[in-house]
Image (cartoon, helix red, strand yellow):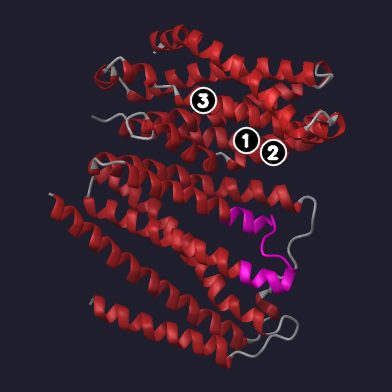
């Protein structure tokens, strides 16, 4: 089952790369730089998905006290932080030639980086508590606080930046994108989602085995 | 509950003195770090003010459960009859009071050192400060209970609290900036709503999850 998931994920990623870097046309104004979107946008999606899963798994853990929910939350947070990091990195690489700078306090950059440090703190908390049960409880509480904070972060950062400057220009509305680009993007979305599922199941299993070995 | 409150206040005498001195030192540090140029300092004032609030808040809030831990009363907290949420609310009220006192002092010091005319903007400023402080204290109290029994808690507490408070900091600094420029509260209504929403969310999550933090 896990093998199968891994195989399908790999196939999806390869297909996504071929679609994004081979078949999809070169974007007229930005050139090849635009192709990083095929990695960047699915990464953000996976990051948000992962943090959503952390919230659900945390609530389930607090109610049911099932170790599986705790391991799922832990694994999902790790993968989420990874993909948030990927989002920031790919965004930076895209921003250098397009905006002429690696970093700017643009609304979306800011909110993603706040998410990044928030869940990095979550992982830090997990690492610092030796008692497994207590660590799981505290992490679940933090996972819930952090998730409820996401909309607050979003709005505050949005108002913070965009009251004084127009929204970023590079938002490609779906209407203006050719079908082939949308198709390439969708393939990558699917592939990244599978990759997320693969990572999380593997990681949760390792965490489960670690817990077993310790017990 | 009320008894808890009183306990916190009685203790806060020692915390309060230290925090008062700390905020005075903060002002000195800000001045030394940025130079005596009034013009430049004025531009950064809202940020400095909230930096001061947050730094003293980190110290004050981080000590929320120190008394219980040092005096081995932690079990007493756990075994206390009734709803654990009451303990949270009590601690929160105590923290809120402590922080507001420190913030008042800090504000007066800012007014004195930076030659601000605070009287005219005080009511509006008070609204912003109270809304922001509730948000700070609500999460701070919850996290303080979590980190109280963890090693390296002095380190972990700010590391957890600061990212979560990022939206609150953005909102309060922006609102304070507008208020200090003499604008009405209406012009920053969206920030106040955000702060109010943060207050409600944080306190609600705190009340609902505190039970799990204080489990044996």
- Answer whether labels 1 and 2 touch (C-beta < 8 Å): yes
Q: Identify residue for label 3.
A: B59
Residue B83 percent coordinates (x, y)? 32, 22
The answer to whether residue B103 shows anywhere in this view is no
Residue B35 percent coordinates (x, y)? 79, 31
Left or right: A86 with respect to A53? right
Local secondary structure at mark 2 = helix
Nearer to me, A96 or B189: A96
Q: Nearer the viewer, mark 3 or mark 1?
A: 3
Q: Residue at x 25, y 79 (%)?
A: A3
| Residue A48 against residue A37 in the figure, above or below | above
Residue A213 percent coordinates (x, y)? 14, 55
Mark pair 3, 1: CA separation: 22 Å
Q: Main secondary structure of the magenta part?
A: helix
Left or right: A72 with respect to A92? left
| Residue B176 against residue A29 in the figure, above or below | above
Mark pair 1, 2: CA separation: 6 Å
- Answer whether labels 2 and 3 touch (C-beta < 8 Å): no
Q: Residue at x 64, y 20 (%)?
A: B25
Nearer to me, A186 or A47: A47
Q: Which disc is residue B191 wearing?
A: 2
Q: Which numbered disc, 2 or 3, marks the residue that appears first in the sequence?
A: 3
Question: Is residue A61 inside the magenta stretch?
Answer: no
Q: What residue span does the magenta drawing correspond to?
A: A92-112
Q: Residues within 10 Å of mark 1 (few under 14, many from 20)?
A: many
Residue B8: name its quadrant: top left
Which corner quadrant holds the C terminus of chain B? top left
Left or right: A195 with respect to A174? left
The answer to whether residue B90 shows anywhere in this view is yes
Q: Identify residue for label 1.
A: B195
Local secondary structure at mark 1 = helix
Q: Residue at x 66, y 41 (%)?
A: B170
């Amino acid at each position: 089952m896990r093998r199968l998931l891994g195989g399908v994920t790999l196939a999806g990623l390869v297909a996504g790369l071929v679609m994004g870097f081979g078949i999809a046309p070169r974007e007229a104004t930005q050139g090849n730089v635009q192709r990083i979107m095929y990695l960047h946008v699915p990464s953000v999606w996976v990051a948000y998905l992962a943090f959503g899963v952390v919230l659900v798994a945390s609530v389930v853990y607090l109610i049911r006290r099932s170790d599986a929910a705790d391991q799922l939350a832990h694994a999902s947070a790790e993968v989420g932080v990874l993909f948030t990091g990927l989002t920031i990195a790919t965004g930076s690489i895209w921003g250098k030639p397009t905006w002429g700078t690696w970093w700017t306090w643009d609304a979306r950059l800011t909110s993603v980086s706040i998410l990044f440090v928030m869940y990095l703190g979550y992982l830090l908390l997990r690492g610092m508590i030796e008692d497994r049960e207590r660590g799981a409880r505290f992490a679940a509480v933090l996972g819930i606080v952090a998730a409820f904070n996401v909309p607050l972060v979003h709005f505050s950062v949005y108002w913070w930046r965009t009251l004084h400057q127009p929204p970023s220009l590079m938002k490609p509305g779906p209407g203006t994108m050719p079908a082939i680009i949308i198709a390439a993007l969708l393939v990558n979305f699917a592939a990244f989602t599978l990759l997320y599922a693969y990572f999380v199941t593997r990681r949760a299993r390792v965490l489960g085995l670690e817990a077993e070995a310790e017990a | 509950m009320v008894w808890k409150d009183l306990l916190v206040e009685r203790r806060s005498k020692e915390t309060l003195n230290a925090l008062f001195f700390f905020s005075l030192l903060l002002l000195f540090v800000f001045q030394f770090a940025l130079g005596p140029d009034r013009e430049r300092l004025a531009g950064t004032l809202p940020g400095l003010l909230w930096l001061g609030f947050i730094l003293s808040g980190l110290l004050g809030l981080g000590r929320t459960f120190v008394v219980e831990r040092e005096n081995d009363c932690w079990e007493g907290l756990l075994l206390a009859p009734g709803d654990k949420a009451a303990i949270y609310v009590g601690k929160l009220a105590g923290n809120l009071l402590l922080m507001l006192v420190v913030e008042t002092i800090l504000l007066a010091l800012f007014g004195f050192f930076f030659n601000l005319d605070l009287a005219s903007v005080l009511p509006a400023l008070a609204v912003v400060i109270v809304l922001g402080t509730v948000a700070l204290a609500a999460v701070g109290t919850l996290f303080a209970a979590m980190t109280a029994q963890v090693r390296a808690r002095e380190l972990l507490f700010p590391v957890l609290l600061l990212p979560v408070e990022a939206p609150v900091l953005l909102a309060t600094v922006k609102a304070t900036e507008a208020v200090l420029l003499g604008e009405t509260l209406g012009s920053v209504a969206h920030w106040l709503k955000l702060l109010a929403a943060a207050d409600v969310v944080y306190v609600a999550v705190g009340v609902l999850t505190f039970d799990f933090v204080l489990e044996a």
